[in-house]
Amino acid sequence: MERYYTTNLKYVDASNNSPALPNMQCRTDLSNFYNIRVAAADAKSYRLEAAPEGGQQDPKCGTLSVTQTGVKGATGSAGVAQCW
């Protein structure tokens, strides 16, 4: 996302679509555990989410998220401090 922003000065294309996440090794390694996606994006901000898959599902942490400013989130009952 940051590389796209550096080149285009925004996080979305002319149709307001976010770029596809690259198939990097870490994403491939985590694919059995998390579904990683761009949950929201506009010209100046984005939020990535990692939704747990299969045995990784944990109600304490739930779906993890991070924004372009580094703000982290967790939908579960344990909260950010215990899940990140």
Image (cartoon, helix red, strand yellow):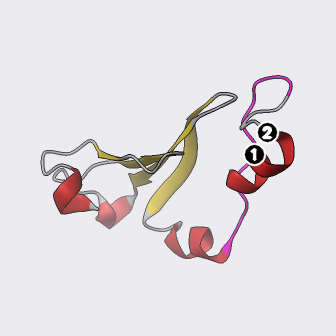
Instruction: Give how far across and how far down residue 9 sits, in percent.
Output: 79, 39
> Residue reaching furthest top?
15
- The alpha-carbon separation of the residues under discs 2 and 1 comes to 5 Å
* Residue at left offset 83%, top offset 22%: 15
The answer to if 40 sits in the magenta stretch is no
| Circles 2, 1 touching at the beta carbon (< 8 Å) | yes
* Residue at left offset 57%, top offset 47%: 37
The answer to if 22 sits in the magenta stretch is yes
- 14 w.r.t. 24: above or below: above
Quadrant occupied by the C terminus: bottom left
Which label belongs to residue 22?
none
- 35 w.r.t. 38: above or below: below
- 31 w.r.t. 10: above or below: below
Instruction: Give how far across and how far down residue 75 sits, in percent.
Output: 26, 41
Instruction: Give how far across and how far down residue 3 sits, in percent.
Output: 75, 56
Q: Which residues are magenta?
A: 14-24
Q: Nearer the viewer, residue 50 or 56?
A: 50
Hey, what amino acid is under mark 2?
Answer: Leu
Which label belongs to residue 9?
2
Mark 2: which secondary structure? loop
* Residue at left offset 19%, top offset 57%: 81
Mark 1: which secondary structure? helix
Hey, what amino acid is under mark 1?
Answer: Tyr
Does residue 13 appear left or right of residue 41 in this picture?
right
Does residue 16 appear left or right of residue 79 in this picture?
right
Q: Nearer the viewer, residue 13 or 58?
A: 13
Label 2 neighbour load within 10 Å: few <14, some 14-19, many 20+: few
Instruction: Give how far across and how far down residue 6 sits, in percent.
Output: 78, 50
Q: Most prominent secondary structure in the magenta stretch?
A: loop
Q: Which residue carries the number 1 mark?
A: 5
* Residue at left offset 48%, top offset 68%: 32
